[in-house]
Image (cartoon, rainbow, N blue to C red):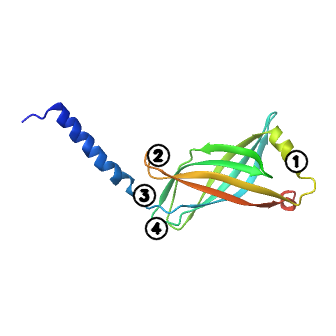
Amino acid sequence: MTMFPSLKAGLFVTVILLLIPIASCSTINTIQPEVNLMRLDVLDVTLSHVNLLAELRVFNPNETSVTIQGVDYTLYLEDIKVFSGRSGLAQTINPQEYGFLTLRLSTAYWNIIQLLNRLPDKADVAFSMQGSIRVGESRLFSKHFSFEKEGMIPLHKTTQ
């Protein structure tokens, strides 16, 4: 018995549509990981940019491992957008454990000059980091979680 081509195509599409929810089930019930900015280090200074490394600590509150597919981020210092970018680093974090992501950041001197003009009388630098983290076994079925962190960076510690 031979199936008609349109019936075969319809059956194929139906099977695929049934498999998509099954493949993405592990991501559906994922609790949002906790993201914290742990440190910023100057990597190098070029003729046009300042390059830094930022270390993010990510806590997995889930009962199963999660795979981080990437991070989108924007960092403000004293309300000046200093860094923005996207990282495609993939890392699996075990349940109830921490993982660390290192991001390479680059900014133009103009942003640093604006920042320095606001610092002369300040003991601390206000920061705000916003972004999203992509979690899932595959990029196709990943889930985006937004995060926003604010705080102060004490300048007396950065000069030591």
Circle 1 SS class = helix
Q: Residue 63 carries which label?
A: 4
Q: Element type at marker 2?
A: loop
155 up-or-down from 140: above or below:
below
Q: Name the residue under label 2.
A: 139
Specify few, some or many for label 3: CA neighbours under 10 Å numbering under 14, 14-19, or 20 or more. few
Q: Which of marks 4 and 1 is in front?
A: 1
Quick one: SS at disc 3? helix
Residue indicated by mark 3: 28
Mark 2: few/some/many CA within 10 Å (<14, 14-19, 20+): few
- Asked whether residue 37 appears in the rendered view, the answer is no
Query: Looking at numbered disc 4 in the image, what kind of residue is underneath it?
Result: Glu
Task: Compute the Cα span from label 1 to label 3.
Answer: 44 Å
Q: What residue type is labelled 3?
A: Ile
Q: Which of marks 4 and 3 is in front?
A: 3
Q: Which of marks 2 and 1 is nearer the N terminus?
A: 1
